[in-house]
Amino acid sequence: MADNDLGAFLRARREAVAPADVGLRAGPRRRTPGLRRAELATAAGISVEYLTRLEQGRDRRPSPEIIGALADALGLAAEERVHLHRLSKVGGGSACQSAQPPDRTVRPTVRALLDRLEPAPALVVNPLGEVLAFTGGYERLAGPLGLLDDRPPSLTRFVFTDDRARAAFPDWERIADERAADLRAAASLGDGHAAMLADELAVVAGPCFSGRYASAAALPGRTGVERWAHPRAGEVSLAYETLDLPGPAEQRLTVYLPADGAAESALALLAAERVG
């Protein structure tokens, strides 16, 4: 990393924002392009002195809340928010940058169990909400929604950062509450990877994540009913059961079953498409 990449990025983005973009008049005597420091500081709810320290590299440890406020004030796109978050972590000397990645190994016996569960939608996740293994039934259900596009797929990232999530889950608000509560539970037990993901989502997703994360006080239910909106099968109500798998990786197996006759017909339709 260069000497002050975080400060350079903040200044470059500040100078690229037109005053009109944040509801300000350009005025006849602006000696610098874009926003003045005072204007950005006011929009982000921080002091001019603190913004100056950030841009000059004299403070390189802004909190996720500060980074999120600056990203909102600058109108950053999602990829710019991720970049800003990563710059703040590197600039702050975060020890987690060199940590080993989370364990994503699924035991052969668990994979064999998934094979036996076909054609039911079933998946294995880790505490971060990453999808580590799944049945063909789950792929037919979740794949067309975009949930499996990332590598590795992540339920948590999808819910909070993918625009398709709200259409995929008619009860998105409840699903989002559960994903945030799961992540906070993992972070509270000392999972550094979960804490890092929470910091990133506080910046990338903003208040829709951070508010839920801050207020999560209990674990979400491990059984219940979810509604999915599938592009070919329509709205599907699925009952689910979640089981903890033994082992230090703290993986969980979730199996979906039709909650009513309409869901049973929908899953049968998707299974028939595979055969056809």
Image: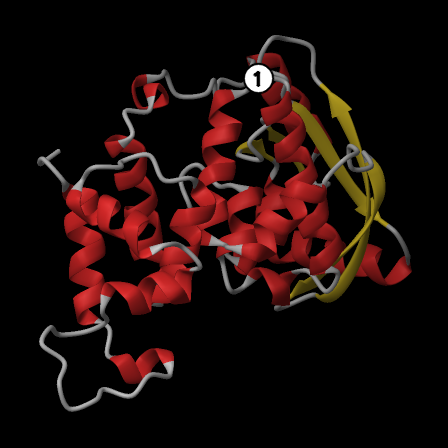
Q: Which x, y percent locates residue 28?
A: 15, 91
Residue assigned mark 1: 190
Residue 32, how many percent across, how many down?
A: 11, 73
Q: Residue furthest top?
A: 247
**Coloring applied to the structure:** secondary structure
Which residue is more in the foreground, 94 or 153? 94
Q: Which of the two residues, 219 or 126, is positioned nearer the viewer here? A: 219
Q: In the image, is residue 274 above or below residue 2? A: below
Q: Is residue 75 above or below residue 66?
A: below
Question: Which image quarter holds the N terminus?
Answer: top left
Identified by mark 1, the residue type is: Gly
**In the structure shown, which secondary structural element does the residue marked by tag 1 occupy?**
loop
**Percent position of residue 5, x then y:** 15, 43
User: Residue at 9% of width from left, 76% of height from top?
Assistant: 31
Question: In the rendered image of this protein, does residue 254 appear above or below residue 270?
Answer: above
Q: Residue at x 44, y 42 (%)?
A: 64
Number of numbered discs? 1
> In the drawing, does residue 167 fall left or right of residue 50?
right
5 relative position to 89: left or right: left
Can you give x and y, in whole percent of width and height, for residue 234 in the image?
A: 71, 69
The residue depicted at 35 percent of the width and 67 percent of the height is 75
Mark 1, Cα crowd under 10 Å, few <14 / some 14-19 / many 20+, is few
Query: Relative to 223, is 273 on the left or the right?
Result: left
Q: Residue at x 64, y 42 (%)?
A: 213
254 or 54, nearer to the observer: 54
